[in-house]
Amino acid sequence: MASRFIALLLFVSSALALPSPQLEKRQSACATSSTIPGYNNTILPNPFQFDDGTPVTTADDWACRRSQIAALIQGYEAGYLPPAPPIVSATFSQSGTTGTLNVTAGLSTTNTVSFSNTITYPSGTAPSSGWPLVIAYDILTIPVPDGIATLVYDNDEIAQENSLASRGVGLFYDLYGANATASAMTAWVWGTSRIIDALEQTSAANINTAKIAVTGCSRDGKGALMAGAYETRFALTIPQDGDDVQQATEIVTEDPWFSVNFDNYVYDISVLPYDHHELAAMVAPRGLISYENTEYEWLSPLSAYGCMSAAHTVYQALGIPDYHGFVEVGNHSHCYFPDSLDDSLYAFFDKFLLDEPQTNTSYFYTNYAFNGTVWDPSYWINWTTPDLS
Ligand SMILES: *[C@@H]1O[C@H](CO)[C@@H](O)[C@H](O)[C@H]1NC(C)=O
Ligand SMILES: *[C@@H]1O[C@H](CO)[C@@H](O)[C@H](O)[C@H]1NC(C)=O
Ligand SMILES: *[C@@H]1O[C@H](CO)[C@@H](O)[C@H](O)[C@H]1NC(C)=O
Ligand SMILES: *[C@@H]1O[C@H](CO)[C@@H](O)[C@H](O)[C@H]1NC(C)=O
Ligand SMILES: *[C@@H]1O[C@H](CO)[C@@H](O)[C@H](O)[C@H]1NC(C)=O
Ligand SMILES: *[C@@H]1O[C@H](CO)[C@@H](O)[C@H](O)[C@H]1NC(C)=O
Ligand SMILES: *[C@@H]1O[C@H](CO)[C@@H](O)[C@H](O)[C@H]1NC(C)=O
């Protein structure tokens, strides 16, 4: 099984080579486009600039800018993420602390797919608004405190990732057709959204759908970040552990994590008018804590720190820097979560899932194990962080 993290080193791009027309209407600045032809920039793209070059100046502007970033990432890299299909239904049964949520999604009554999910409940009495929940891609690799239910999500059933030959295989493609442009990463997001749809209509499942976190490790960490970025019903996003960083040219040869369209850009990523700091920033203003492992090599830790430092400027601009945590240490194996990281993790659970909003979640740490190289923010970031709050 592939286990490499895909913290793509998409450190690139020139700020917009587009003219900067006066902003006539907020709406025109906010129009979403799936590509920006002619873009070329070797440093990180400015998250505070609309596609047309006008500045992002308010929190509402950020919501617009976020929708533009969402469209660009689909356009170049992720493929099309369909909205909820017309049919989403669910059945639920429970035995002791084990619940079974069967989700059916359909485009018509003759074109449906179903998948089953096991929910593990805490013992004891549920809060009046229902249990908080952690959805873990593939396998649960982080500790979860008492009082939170867990659901291990079989993302590979939704979209396979055995090799490039598995592109288009899985329930998502059974429903939308093998020609759907969505990559596996995108199809997985769609599956998490259908689980939340199902939970919203299934009161017997007793999950508080305002208190759901998503997590995953390695490639599933990227998957969890995609889910938190695109599905705004996730209150908290917890990606864990890169390993070896993979360059864009390499990553597209391994598994169908990206759309085939992305192959066109991997040799000149400076034409991409976004980078993954903006994928992380799409989670804002919701909670995000990511963990990176410096045990194996230095390029992935360096890029993760740089990427998250750049994403952090969006949380700073919104006046909520503590909603975005980052902790980067080594001395542990891949996807192992050392006890020393519990404090930060539990603080984020307390604040975002367990109704303890006063909890201090100011965690932004790296051990700088970059093999003598440095992250030079003045090289990569040439924007001034505005005050949007
Ligand atoms: C940032 O860099 C881009 C690309 O080189 C350039 O077009 C833009 O003018 C720069 N912005 C500032 C404020 O220096
Ligand atoms: C982008 O700019 C770089 C450096 O200026 C150049 O080498 C590259 O060919 C350009 N790419 C495109 C698609 O224009
Ligand atoms: C889920 O429900 C559908 C529709 O009722 C049914 O066809 C399917 O067998 C069920 N799957 C599981 C795993 O229970
Ligand atoms: C999918 O695309 C292939 C190649 O373009 C084409 O031959 C096939 O008819 C398409 N299938 C559907 C269901 O659209
Ligand atoms: C790494 O972990 C081992 C075993 O837990 C411990 O003995 C050692 O002190 C740790 N080293 C560092 C640098 O933290
Ligand atoms: C939160 O924790 C950080 C890091 O320990 C500390 O610097 C900061 O003062 C704390 N903030 C509050 C309000 O206690
Ligand atoms: C770390 O840096 C040294 C000195 O530049 C270099 O020889 C070595 O190959 C680097 N290690 C890795 C894993 O890149």
Image: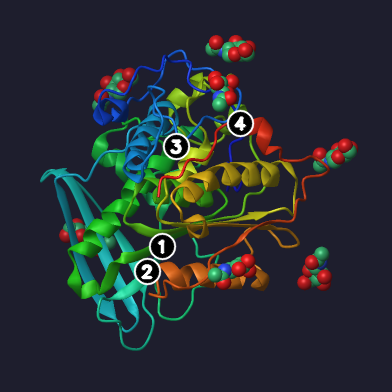
Task: Give x and y (percent) for residue 2.
Answer: 58, 45
At 19% across and 61% down in the image, what residue appears?
A: 90
Q: Nearer the viewer, residue 66 or 157?
A: 66
Query: Which badge, 1 or 3, comes first in the chain's sequence?
Result: 3
Residue bearing the label numbered 3: 166
Q: Earlier in the sequence, mark 2 or mark 3?
A: 2
Q: Residue at x 31, y 56 (%)?
A: 233
Residue 181 image position (x, y, % from top left): 35, 30
Identify the residue under disc 1. 213
Q: Disc number at residue 11? A: 4
What type is the residue that disc 1 sits on? Ala
Q: Amino acid at mark 2?
A: Leu
CA gap, disc 1 to disc 2?
A: 6 Å
Marks 1 and 3 sit apart, C-alpha to C-alpha, by: 28 Å
Compare marks 2 and 4 and give the one earlier in the sequence. 4
Q: Are marks 1 and 2 in contact (CB under 8 Å)?
A: yes
**Marks 4 and 2: in contact by CB < 8 Å?**
no
Label tally = 4
Residue count near mark 2 (Cα–Cα under 10 Å), binned few <14, some 14–19, many ≥20: many
The residue beneath circle 2 is 133
Quadrant field for ligand 7: top right
Q: Earlier in the sequence, mark 1 or mark 4?
A: 4
Binning the other alpha carbons within 10 Å of mark 1 as few (below 14), some (14 to 19) or many (20 upward) gives many
Residue 71, position in %: x, y?
Answer: 35, 32
Where is 127 relative to 270, above or below? below
Q: Secondary structure at mark 3?
A: helix
Any atom of ligand 6 within 8 Å of the CB at mark 1?
Answer: no
Of 332 and 46, the residue lying toward us: 46
At mark 1, the secondary structure is: strand
Inspect the image, locate mark 4, and give the three-letter code of the amino acid beneath it. Phe
